[in-house]
Each structure stands twice: as C-alpha cells, then as structure tokens.
Image: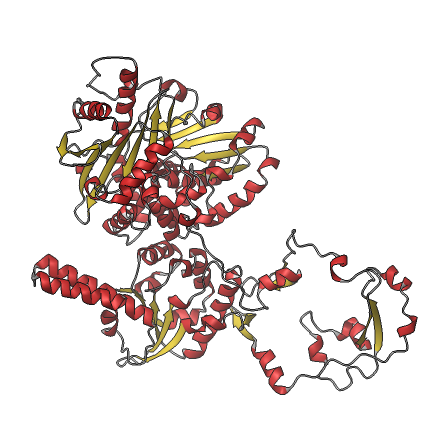
Amino acid sequence: MELYLQECKHNLKNASESSKIQIVLGNESCDLDSAISSLVMAYFIFKVQKTADIVIPVLNVKRKELAVRTEVVFFLEETSISISDVICIDEIDLKALHEKGKLSLVLVDHNTLSVEQSYLDSRVVQIFDHHQIDNPDNLKKINAKVEPVGSCCTLVAEEILNSNASLMDPQVAMLLYGTILLDTICLNETAQRVTEKDRKIIAKLETILEGVNRNEVFETLQKVKFDVSKLTPVQLLYKDTKLISDNSTSIVLISYPGLLQDVLQEESFRSALEDMVSSKNLSSIILLGMKVAEGQSIVRRQIAVYDKNPSSLEKISKYLQKLENPSLGLRQLPFCGYPLTLFEQENIALTRKFVLPAMQNYLKFDQSGHSDLNNSYDNSNENISKNVNSVDNYEVEFPEDVIPTYQAEPLDFPDSPDHSRLLGMPFQSPMSGQVSLISEPDEVEFKKSDATPEGTGTLKRIAVHPKVLESEYVEDDQRSLSSLSNRSDAFSQSEDIILDDDAATIDDLDNSDCDSDLDSPISDRIPEMSAAEEFEEERSWKTCTVNGEDKKIDMKVIEPYRKVLSHGGYQNSSGHAIIIFSACYLPDRSRKDYEYVMDNLFLYVITTLDELVADDYILVYLHGATDRSNMPSFGWLKRCYQMIDRRLRKNLKGLYLVHPTFWLKTIVIMTRPFISSKFTRKLKFVYNLKELSNLIPLDYVCIPDKVKQLDFEKCMREYIRQMKTHNLNSNPVYITYLNSLYKTEMS
C-alpha cells in the first residue's frame, strides 16, 4: 500500500500528461471511515478494475487541517503508512482536470457532493456509501452501492473479498478491520450501529489477521480519537464540523469527542467558541458530545445549544426537545452563567446524521414564517430543506505554530548520499547494489563569474603518472589516487596536464596563453599517508557478505547508532547468548539520508550478530521509549527478515519484544503471512522489565535509562490504578502521596 501511495504522489506531478485520471474522494469530515475507504478503494481500483491511467485517493481536507484528525494520522502511521504520502484536497487541482475533460470521480462514504464541489457532479461514475440517499434520481445513472451498514469500509472490504481476495493482505485488512470496529463501537448492540454484514466482514478479516485482539484494536483507536490533550480549543472546534445556512442564518454542528459538561467549564474553550461565532458571523452553534466508557463500551451523548440571542436559543432548544418519531430523549442539565442550554441525550442511537437534517428542517420552517415549527421528523428526503445553500465542512486557517512539522537534522557525515547529491556524484545503496546518479538540484546554478573574474585565472599543473592514463592499469572504479601515492615510483616519470581556470573546453585550452608557465617546476606530489591515516581511512568502510554477495558498510554514517546492538551475557540454564537490540537508538526518519543510514545499519547489525553468535541465542528487542519518528517502516522490516541468513534464524531460540505498543503488535500481525510458523512461535511479548528478569538474567544487560524511566512510569500507573480499583488502600492521603511520588520521579 505504501508503495502505491508513493507512486500516486509521483503520478500527481504528471497528471496533466495523462489521458484519464480517476479520483477516489471521501467526505468533507475526513474521519477514519472516509479516509481509509478512499485509500483502500483507490488501491483496489488501481489493482483490479483499472478504469483509468491514474487512480489517486484524495482526502477531502486541507493538509494543515489533517492534524486534528487524530485517529486518521495515528492509524495510518501505526500501519506503516506515512502521513506525508497521502494526498489532500488542496494538493490537487480538480477544477483544472475537470475543465480538461480528463477527470472521473468515485465517491466513498457520501453520495452527494458539497455545494462547493457540486460543479463535479457530472464527473461522478461510482459511489460506495452507507448513509441515507440524498438524491435517488442521480444514483440511477451511475454505478452505486449504498447500503445502511455500520461502516463504509464494510462495503469496500466486501467488494475486495468478492472480486480479488488475494489483494486483501494483512496491511489492507488491518486498515479496514480497525475502521469498522471504531464505526460500530466494537460491534456493540447498544449503540445500534452494527449490522449482520459488519459482523460477517469482521469475522473474515480476523481469519487474515491471525492473533488480532478485537477489543485492544478498538480501545486503542477509541482512546486516540477522543484524546484531545494535544489539540488546542480552536482545533477541537474544527475537528469535525458541518455548516448549514440560508440567506440570513448560519448554524454550525460540531461533533466533540467527550462530555460537554467537562469541556464547557474551561475558559479557553468558551473563548474559542465565542471567537468562532464572531469571526464567522454564525447565528448558533450546536455541540454534539459523545464519550465511550473505557473497557465497558457504554455510550453517553450530550447536546449543547449556543446562541447569544435568548429568543433564538429558547426556540432551537425547544425544537430539539420536542422532536418525535424518533425522539432524542433530551434531559436538560444545570448550566449557569453562559448563553447556552445543555442536555443529556438519552437516545444514544441518534447521531449527527439525525440532528443535521432535523436542523435543516428547522431552518426551512423558521425562515418560511411558520408560527409553529414542525416538531415531528422522519428520515424521508421530503422533510429535508431544498433551500439550504450549503452543508459543508467549516474551514479554519490554523496558525503556523499549531501545525506539527518535522525538522530534519543536519547531515552528520560528508560521505552520506546528501553530500554526494550536492556534488552530483554517484552513490551505491549497500542493500540494493545499484548505483544511481543523484542530480544536482535545479535551483543550484554555478556561474563562472561568481567564482573568478574573467582573465584573472591561474594555470594549474597536475602531475599524473603515465600508467594512470592506461585503461589496463586501473583495476576498478573504486581505485583512488591516494592508493597510488604509496608507490615509490608513482610520480617518478610524470606527464603534465595543464589547466587554465578560465578554460571551459578543449578549444579554450588550445587558445590559452600559457607559454610563460611551461618552464615552471612540476607541482608538489600528493603527500603520502601515514600508517595511522591509512588505518583510519580503511576502517571507515567494512566489507561483509550477505546471501553470498559482498557488501560494504559505511561505518562513519552509522557511528552514532552502533549502540542499538549489545551483548547481554548468557542465560544461566541453557547457556544461550543474550543479544540486546535497543530501538530508542535508531535514527530519526526525518533524516534526508535515512534510507541510506538504515541500509548500512542493517548490514552492521547482521554482521555483528554473526560475529557475536556462535551457537544458539536469544534476541531481546527493547521497544519502549522509542519515538514514533524512530520506528522503522514495515517494508524495511520485511526486507530485513528476507535477507537474514538462515543460520541466524535457525539459531534464534527466542525473540522477546519488551514494552510492546499497538504499532509493534500490528507489525507482528502484518508480518505473519511471510514469516515461518516456527519463527512466529519464538515471539513473546514482555510487558515490563520485571517480567523480562524472570526470563533472562539482567546482570550484564545494558538497558537505556529512558527505557528504565518508561518502565517505572508504567508500573507506577498500574499500581495506582489497582489501588483505586480494588480499594486496597482508599486513604486519599496515601493516594496523594503516590501521585506526588510519581510526578517527582517524572520531573
């Protein structure tokens, strides 16, 4: 999948040259269902249907607003898809493609384009959706699959399984699986969002994702979705919004991931709410809050109506309270000192999909001058206003300081490919064995006038041994002039090549006025290297053999990362060697030469393992305290496994994965189809260092300080949780003491 998305990025640059381009577009909310549906459906069309020259998935949100879709960013990264590889709506010119007649559209997770994008209606050729049909007549003209299931990903998964099940690899299956669970509240009946088809698709996906834990996947995604700790109040308000309006009234509906009674107590949130109303000239704001109790799948919903006009506030509040067939079941909660009303929603089955058309209906009757609003509401299209000008995502210009960005670290070594790129030199990837020329950037242009004024150049005399000019003397491309300097006769009989700084061509050399310098003495020889310098030069490269092929390791570039591998002694009972791999020492993916560093680091690890391990061994992978930006990609891990020598695989008696995260468990599940069952049985998740000490002696194991710190944090949090849960010591003074101790250790 990641290779396909990278190819889409490349194809986007050449889109104007293609005859047919198909865009798979999700809805404007760009929630997880919309994002994953567009990515996977485009991948399926590209691989199977092949209805266009280029098939590109597009997330229907601006790049700078993608950060607030926390569950989307998290899940893509956890399944080894870089967020930089996806294409957002502001990174492609759909209007230009439409005008050139090259565009066709596939809609997923919605069946009607927004007013802003309605000019593309004629380009829609296919629809996959699970929402209520807005315009049945339009669907008769195109290929549409619209069913009331819990998630659009259910329909996408069904299409793939029925058409080409081989395309459903573990990565694609995990993307669909997690999204369906999140949309259906882990197939929870009380939420009234799951159907029989959702259950069947989940069961089929679980046969592909061997060992997957349904509750763990759901709770992880649910926690990330509702974790707003890293978002500002402004970002929270624009995380998931819908705007409805007519000529004079604008109402925005905001889905908030949490209970409203909590967040409305915060002054910063209330200020952001007021700023939103005044800056966008809104009449009212309707907040829809939802929270799922962790570990219990108990859903709570709340609704708040904000309006500075007391009459309008009362009118909207009463309208929502009196809705029937079905009823929201609103129970007003006490909330003073602010121009809003707050309700507990007893009917938790009704979501924004119900409230949105209900408010459209409200605008229709309110603006038509009816004294008595229609309090009954059903789900038919007739009751949805035809006069509403827009139902669209609200846009916000985020300040630059709230948009997360990566800062690439400077290059550490002049031997890295990026240094070579500046010189236009070829470099060789140690794992691929292919040599490629990295071209100089277009914007870098060297002008002779910038270096030396015309006519002021000096002549340079370079002494060259005659044999250097003979092709049979040079054994290979890697021979350097420094190796010739060790020969006593290297420059005994020299021929001179005279270059003029101002000479750009051979003809210029012929015309150069250099007679006065012909009698000058030969330039100094290249100084011979000392023994220490020769040793230092040789040790910067190390030769190894992988799968019968000789490879060279750039030891300089991996010098800062050699601590990833260490020897931890031997197991007492079996005598197996203990090898420690500390992932926290891996390089950051923001490095420009990251792939080059990782390829060399892999060769170093394999070579070192081969030197350290004579017989059987145990590998301990310390995953804890590793930043997301330091975690290797799924493709790199897969390639590494395939290149490991059979002896190292066979002699491995245990692979202990310490402090496993959701990402690590996902990677293990995704790798099972291409690793042997014997290797899989050697894997064991270890959740803390105490558990690890029961498996191997830690006397000679070098554990990084940050891993120890993480282990302490986890153990302390678990201890405090158990104290509170089981009332082992309910004394609040003791609990306060534990919390203060925990915070002191963290500071």
> Which residue is at 31% across, 45% downward?
178
Relative vertical location of residue 317 with respect to residue 678 in this rendering, above or below: above
From the viewer's perspective, is 6 left or right of 489? Answer: left
x%, y% of residue 113?
41, 27
> Which residue is at 36% across, 56% downward?
667
Front residue of 541/718: it is 718
Front residue of 314/648: it is 314
The quadrant of the rendering that contains the C terminus is bottom left
From the viewer's perspective, is 720 left or right of 442? Answer: left
x%, y% of residue 422?
63, 60
The answer, for residue 500, to whether it is visible in the render is yes
Q: How is the image coloured?
A: secondary structure
From the viewer's perspective, is 463 left or right of 120? Answer: right
Total count of labels: 0
> Which residue is at 51% across, 67% downward?
600
Front residue of 155/193: it is 193
The answer, for residue 192, to whether it is visible in the render is no
In which quadrant of the rendered view does residue 262 lie? top left
Relative vertical location of residue 489 with respect to residue 20 in this rendering, above or below: below
Q: Residue lying at the far front in this picture: please name it.
A: 337
Relative vertical location of residue 714 with respect to residue 562 in this rendering, above or below: above
In which quadrant of the rendered view does residue 723 lie? bottom left
x%, y% of residue 485?
72, 81
x%, y% of residue 8?
51, 43
